[in-house]
């Protein structure tokens, strides 16, 4: 429900990207980022511990999952970071297999990404990362990403193609207003998830005591 609310707020603030009823200037993704790179094209050597290594299965629309991770050594990560080093505020954008899903990096912890994940460095003078990720996840931009995705068995949304994705460009201040609302909603969601987890843990404890006859 909160996800639906956020989508409704986006449409209310900016209008439908397809029809652009508010008449915002048009642009392409490449106009709003300082660069688009991807991870290594060679399979890394995994280790039991070390630096988290993310693939497309860890990226969903608006969310980065930190579950079921693989790891690489810090030495291998240092080599990869010379080409592609994610930082807070960057956008991860799936470009292989499942393509066209964007999520903002909201951590300072180091990690690396696979070749099927693009790293977008937002031009902060023109775009807010939270707004840009929401725009990329809109039906309008997602459908473009699918048209730019080539291949059947090995689906690929190339870096040179993805930067051609068209969108509108509202004022930066309005983008930031949306980002602030999205952050408040995310904090509310975190609280709800935490309460749900505590409730589930409490129920499991009571259930265990009931079956053990210790209530």
Image: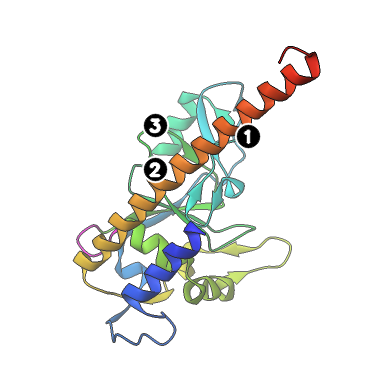
- The answer to whether residue 194 is above or below residue 5 is above
User: Label 2 to label 3, Cα distance in Å?
Assistant: 10 Å
Q: Is residue 57 left or right of residue 106?
A: right
Q: Which residue is mark 2?
A: 86
Viewer can see residue 103: yes
Q: Residue furthest top?
A: 214
Q: Which residue is mark 1?
A: 68
Q: Is residue 16 left or right of residue 129?
A: right
Q: Toward the viewer: 171 or 198? A: 198
Sequence-first tag of 3 and 1: 1
Helix, strand or loop at mark 1: loop
Q: Nearer the viewer, mark 1 or mark 2?
A: 1
Neighbour class for label 2 at 10 Å: few (<14), some, many (≥20)?
A: many
Q: Position of residue 162 (x, y in %)?
A: 47, 67
The chief SS type of the magenta part is: loop
Q: Residue furthest front?
A: 215
Report the residue at 45% width, 37% height from top: 80
Report the residue at 56% width, 29% height from top: 71
Q: Nearer the viewer, mark 2 or mark 3?
A: 3
Helix, strand or loop at mark 2: loop
Cβ–Cβ under 8 Å for marks 1 and 2: no
Q: Is residue 79 magenta?
A: no
Viewer can see residue 105: no
Q: Which residue is mark 3?
A: 109
Looking at the rendering, the stretch of residues picked out in magenta corresponds to 124-128
Q: Position of residue 64 (x, y in %)?
A: 50, 46
- The answer to whether residue 136 is above or below residue 168 is above
């Amino acid at each position: 429900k909160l996800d639906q609310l956020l989508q409704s707020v986006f449409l209310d603030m900016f209008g439908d990207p397809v029809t652009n009823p508010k008449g915002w200037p048009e642009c392409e993704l490449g106009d709003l980022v300082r660069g688009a790179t991807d991870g290594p094209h060679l399979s890394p050597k995994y280790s039991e511990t070390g630096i988290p290594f993310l693939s497309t299965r860890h990226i969903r629309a608006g969310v980065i999952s930190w579950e079921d991770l693989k790891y690489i050594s810090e030495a291998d990560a240092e080599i990869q970071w010379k080409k592609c080093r994610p930082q807070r505020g960057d956008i991860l954008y799936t470009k292989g297999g499942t393509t066209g899903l964007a999520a903002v990096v909201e951590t300072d912890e180091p990690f690396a990404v696979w070749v099927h994940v693009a790293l977008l460095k937002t031009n902060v003078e023109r775009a807010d990362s939270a707004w840009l990720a929401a725009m990329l996840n809109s039906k309008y931009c997602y459908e473009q990403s699918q048209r730019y995705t080539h291949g059947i068995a090995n689906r690929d949304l190339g870096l040179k193609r993805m930067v051609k994705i068209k969108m509108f460009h509202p004022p930066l201040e309005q983008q930031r207003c949306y980002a602030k609302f999205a952050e408040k909603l995310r904090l509310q969601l975190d609280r709800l998830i935490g309460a749900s987890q505590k409730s589930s843990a409490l129920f499991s404890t009571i259930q265990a005591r009931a079956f053990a006859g210790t209530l």
